[in-house]
Amino acid sequence: MPRPDTRERILDHAERLFAEHGYDRASLRAITEAAEVNLAAVHYHFGSKEHLLEAVFQRRIGPINEERIRRLDLAIAEAAPALPSLRRVLESFLRPAVEQLRRVDAWILMGLARILHEDGAITTRHFDRLFGPVIERYRILLPICPELSPEEIQARFRFMIGAMLHSTVPSGPEELRSRDTDPERQLRRLLAFVEAGFEAPATDEVKA
């Protein structure tokens, strides 16, 4: 089997080392040694360590977000002039991730997710670049769930992401891991759970 080209080889090893050690502790030296390239190759293809991290994220998460927006746009167009259903909007967010998560090593995904939640200007910039446009588009949940405040919708959106990760990535105690290998059945179960969460009564206290 032919070796991946230099750029892809760097990305493969950077992804693994970033996931294993985090952004700060994964050195460019370790990445270049693992990829069997010199430092000049990293600078040629990516320019800097931060831009290399951005390329790692874009390779894994960029296509998922593009598919999310495509599906959301389709749901909006088909429902017009009414709003799309809550389930259709939630499915547009969940389905692309569930389909992709099954194709990638779980520990890599969890490692990259940890980097996105680290404190620091670099990870904040990457989170905003990756998810800012997506989060903005999913503000359509505000008129779909008018009884919920923006803060409560934001909280439930975070819970949805957590449920998605833990239901599709094998992690945690063995007895709590899903043994279901049918992605469609798993997606249906996840959708039922998340939809019920968004339909639950508001928990924000109403101040007089």
Image (cartoon, rainbow, N blue to C red):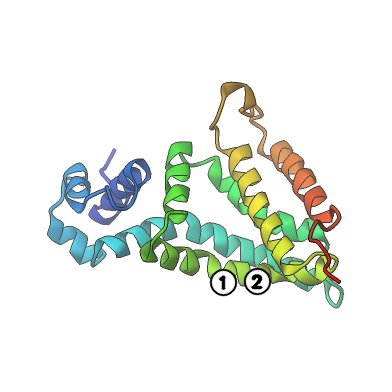
Where residue 118 appears, x then y in whole percent?
42, 54
Where residue 26 appears, x then y in whole percent?
27, 48
Task: State which quadrant residue 190 falls in.
Answer: top right
Disc 2 from disc 1: Cα separation: 6 Å
Q: Are marks 2 and 1 in contact (CB under 8 Å)?
A: yes
Q: Nearer the viewer, residue 12 or 53?
A: 53
**Placement of the N terminus among the 4 image quadrants:** top left
Q: Which mark is residue 184?
A: none
Would you say 122 lies left or right of 101 here? left
Residue 95 visible in the current orientation: no
Residue topped by disc 2: 137
Where residue 106 appears, x then y in whole percent?
48, 38
Q: Amino acid at mark 2?
A: Arg
Q: Nearer the viewer, residue 197 or 180?
A: 197
Describe the element under mark 2 as helix, strand or loop. Answer: helix
Residue topped by disc 1: 133
Describe the element under mark 1 as helix, strand or loop. Answer: helix
Q: Is residue 151 above or below residue 160?
A: below
Give me the residue at 75% from left, 39% from top. Answer: 189
Count residues near mark 2 (Cα–Cα under 10 Å), then give few for <14, some for 14-19, many for 20+.
some
Give me the residue at 21% from left, 42% from top. Answer: 34
Would you say 47 lies left or right of 86 here? left
Residue 103 visible in the current orientation: yes
Q: Amino acid at mark 1?
A: Pro
Q: Is residue 108 above or below residue 201?
A: above
Q: Residue furthest bottom?
A: 81
Give me the residue at 55% from left, 47% from top. Answer: 100
Would you say 183 lies left or right of 129 here? right
